[in-house]
Image (cartoon, rainbow, N blue to C red):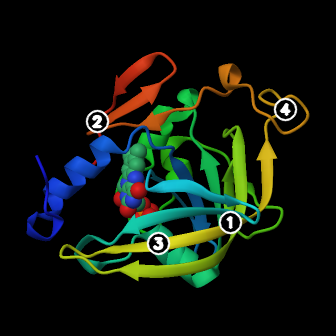
């Protein structure tokens, strides 16, 4: 089977691309607006793209062309945090994917503790084992039939590692870290195997 992308609808492309590029790490992105209202949301269109200089990318799709709160906050404030999602945090991460009004806070909704950034004005997730503090290095918009995507490249300014998971040299013990990854549909790769979790409204 060969898929000609120009002749294929966006839903089919989403299904194919998100079920072949697996597992994907999940960036739990902390940001805030000009009034200091916190926002937290997960993004699996995410990866580290360079260690020297240290950079990551996330991509926020724009449903019907509308920016998500995360993209709006990062484009206006130029800073954000990326908190890595591990097995004990999977259900709370899912809770923060709910669509709620911009003036409401996902930290409260999921029972998580916001921790101020040391370098950036954006909240970290205190419960997360690994937290990156990032400044916006570059952004660009991909246009698409259903709204396209805003691609955000962040320069990692600070990395916070929980002392339980590293060996003192910055190397992580995977057995203790319990990383998870996004699989197809609403499934996740976890240290115990495949795990399903319905998306909240
Ligand atoms: C595991 C997971 C991964 C997600 N990955 C993405 C993604 O890569 N890009 C995206 O635009 N939305 C993604 N979403 C959906 C957003 O998290 C969701 O639209 C969220 O409400 C956006 O919040 P915001 O409006 O506060 O930015 C994902 C959701 C989950 C549960």
Q: In whole angstroms, how far apart are the C-alphas of marks 3 and 4?
A: 32 Å
**Does mark 1's beta carbon lie closer than 8 Å to ligand 1?**
no
Residue shown at 55%/63% (left/top)?
A: 57
Furthest residue to the top?
192
Percent from the top left, x then y, of residue 154? 64, 68
Residue at mark 1? 122
What is the CA distance from the residue labelled 1 to the residue labelled 4? 22 Å
Nearest the viewer among 8 and 98 is 8
First of labels 1, 2 by sequence position: 1
Circles 2 and 3: CB distance less than 8 Å?
no
Query: Viewer-nearest of labels 1 and 4?
Result: 4
Instruction: Reply above or below: 127 against 201.
Output: above
Give the spatial CA distance, label 1 vs label 3. 19 Å
Query: Mark 4 highlights which residue?
Result: 163
Which residue is depicted at the point 57% across and 75% down? 74
Can residue 34 be seen?
A: no
Q: CA distance from mark 1 to mark 2?
A: 28 Å
Label 1 CA crowd tier, 10 Å (few <14, some 14–19, many 20+) = many
Residue corresponding to mark 2: 198
Camera-side residue of 26 and 73? 26
Q: Earlier in the sequence, mark 1 or mark 4?
A: 1
Instruction: Give the residue displayed 51% in from the left and 62% down from the top.
Output: 58
Q: Position of residue 43 (x, y in %)?
A: 46, 54
Mark 4: few/some/many CA within 10 Å (<14, 14-19, 20+): few
Contact, mark 1 vs mark 3 (Cβ under 8 Å)? no
Which of disc 4 and disc 3 is earlier in sequence?
3
6 over 34 or under it: above or below: above
The kind of secondary structure element at disc 2 is: loop
In front: mark 3 or mark 4?
Answer: 3
Q: Which residue is mark 3?
A: 151
């Amino acid at each position: 089977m060969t898929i000609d992308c120009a002749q294929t609808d966006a839903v089919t492309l989403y299904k194919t691309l998100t079920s072949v590029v697996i597992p994907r790490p999940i960036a739990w992105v902390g940001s805030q607006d000009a009034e200091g209202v916190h926002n937290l949301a997960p993004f699996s269109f995410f990866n580290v793209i360079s260690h020297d200089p240290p950079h990551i990318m996330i991509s926020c799709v724009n449903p019907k062309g509308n920016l998500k709160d995360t993209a709006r906050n990062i484009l206006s404030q130029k800073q954000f945090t990326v908190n890595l999602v591990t097995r004990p945090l999977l259900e709370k991460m899912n809770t923060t994917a709910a669509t709620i009004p911009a003036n409401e806070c996902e930290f409260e909704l999921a029972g998580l503790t916001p921790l101020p950034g040391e370098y950036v004005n954006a909240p970290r997730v205190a419960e997360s084992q690994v937290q990156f503090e990032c400044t916006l290095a570059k952004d660009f918009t991909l246009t698409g039939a259903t709204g396209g995507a805003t691609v955000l490249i962040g320069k990692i300014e600070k990395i916070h590692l929980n002392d339980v998971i590293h060996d003192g040299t910055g190397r992580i013990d995977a057995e203790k870290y319990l990383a998870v990854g996004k699989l197809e549909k609403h499934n996740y790769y976890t240290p115990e195997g495949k795990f399903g979790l319905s998306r909240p409204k």
